[in-house]
Image (spheres, rainbow, N blue to C red):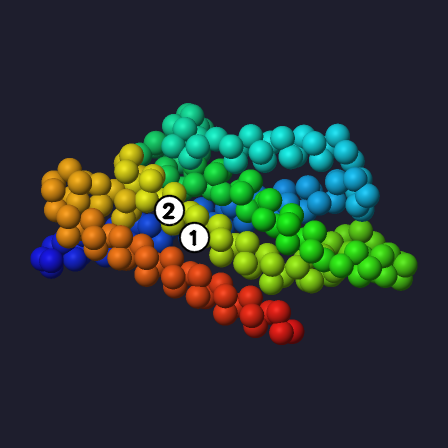
Amino acid sequence: MSPAMLELLGNSLLETLVMVGVSSVLAVAAGLPLGVGLLLTAPGHLYERPWLHRVLALIVNATRSTPFIILMVSIIPLTRLLVGTAIGTRAAIVPLAFAAAPFVARLFETALQAVDRELIDAARSLGATRWQIVWKVLLHEALPGLIAAVTVMVISLIGSSAMAGAVGGGGLGDLGIRYGYQRFQPWVMAAVVVVLMVLVNAVQLAGDVLVRRLSRK
């Protein structure tokens, strides 16, 4: 592979890391309160509000059931409004965050459901407020599960970022399509696949190590 192509591969990797990194932060920022809300408003929980739980679940399920490519196209006006363009790495971050937030919210809800209810009841009997129970019991006890959820989300975003690249989002997907497919350079496509595999395995390894360390505490 020529030095110019290596440089192009490096730049594409950087674009993918930016897309995945920024959209992951935004998705966690939106998905965590959404996941907590789904749990707390469920029947029998701290803020039992069945109608609100159904509304939140409907929003999450509707977004999750929309294919990413359709979601990305359908929110182009919003993407232009937020970042001023519908093409490029910056524009790809918006649909990636929109797609990942409800996905990780469900994963967060599942992780929080695993917290022993006896711990919650014990905290309530000791006079803890609802906010204290959420912060010091639910989020604290579910932290390894939350980290595992974020790991799954980041890996999912790496795949989605490659798809976004195929329609002008930049990154490794864009490089693979433009050079590997359209210019008939299969070694470029192979290099992109290898880099994506290394990236996914690195994220999974880091997530696993962090989960194990937190689980021992």
Q: Position of residue 208 (x, y in %)?
A: 50, 66
User: In the structure shown, which secondary structural element does the residue marked by tag 2 occupy?
Assistant: helix
In contact (CB < 8 Å): disc 1 and disc 2: yes
Q: Can residue 10 be seen here?
A: yes
Q: Going by the image, does 50 lie left or right of 142?
A: right
Say which residue label 1 marks.
155
Out of 94 and 162, give the one closest to the viewer.
162
The picture quadrant where one finds residue 140 is: bottom right
Say which residue label 2 marks.
159
Q: Measure how far apart labels 1 and 2 are at the Cα level.
A: 7 Å
Q: Going by the image, does 58 lie left or right of 191?
A: right
Q: Amino acid at mark 2?
A: Gly
Rendered residue at 78%/35% (across/down): 49
Rendered residue at 79%/40% (across/down): 43
Q: Is residue 51 placed above or below 121 in the rendered structure?
A: above
Q: Is residue 147 placed above or below 33 in the rendered structure?
A: below
Q: Which residue is most to the left?
A: 2
The circle drawn on residue 50 is: none
The picture quadrant where one finds residue 146 is: bottom right
